Amino acid sequence: MSKENELPHSGPLPRPESPQQARETLRAEAFSAPDVQQVKLSATEFTAICPRTGQPDFGTVEIVYVPGKLCVESKALKYYLWSFRDEGAFCESLAARIADDIVYAIDPESVSVDVVQNVRGGIGIVASARRLR
């Protein structure tokens, strides 16, 4: 594991430099998969920036994957998702990007990502991305 992509074992997390750098940390922090058939992760405090209005979008990211040889480390996932806080992106593109980055980080048998954007202006959005090996 590269020292620059290693997270501290205790104390506060450093702020991610970029989603690309956080993607490398997600990969570097992966660990050997135990005998488990499926992993579900739900991040209920996800934020990104609307690329049209510059306003924050709040929501939930739900990730379900069938591990191959590796699993996602939860602190690394929190760090990775934090990297989108100042990123301008539509939730549809975020679902696809997160799914692709999970595949890059751990090469799962399958992954499903739902980005559930909170209602804003009377409209809620759920964007889903699926990847199979």
Image: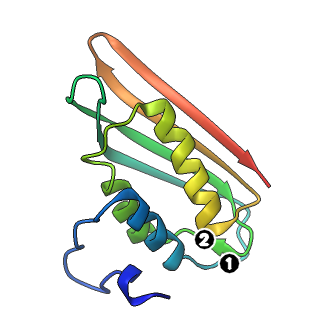
Instruction: Name the residue nearer the viewer: 23 or 13.
Output: 23
Residue 103 percent coordinates (x, y): 64, 59
Task: Name the amino acid, label 1.
Answer: Pro
Task: Name the amino acid, label 2.
Answer: Cys
Mark 2: secondary structure: strand
Residue 71 tag number: 2
User: Which numbered disc flags the more N-terminal residue, 2 or 1?
Assistant: 1
Instruction: Name the residue nearer the viewer: 11 or 97.
Output: 97
Q: Residue at x 50, y 31 (%)?
A: 92
Residue 26 tag number: none
Residue 105 percent coordinates (x, y): 58, 67
Mark 1: secondary structure: loop
Residue 109 percent coordinates (x, y): 77, 59
Q: Residue furthest right?
A: 133
Residue 109 higher or lower than 31, as above or below: above
Q: Is residue 119 left or right of residue 70?
A: left
Q: Residue at x 49, y 35 (%)?
A: 93
Q: Is residue 108 left or right of residue 114?
A: right
Q: CA distance from mark 2 to mark 1?
A: 8 Å
Residue 34 tag number: 1
- Pointers 2 and 1 in contact (C-beta within 8 Å): yes
Instruction: Name the residue nearer the viewer: 53 or 76.
Output: 53
Structure colour scheme? rainbow
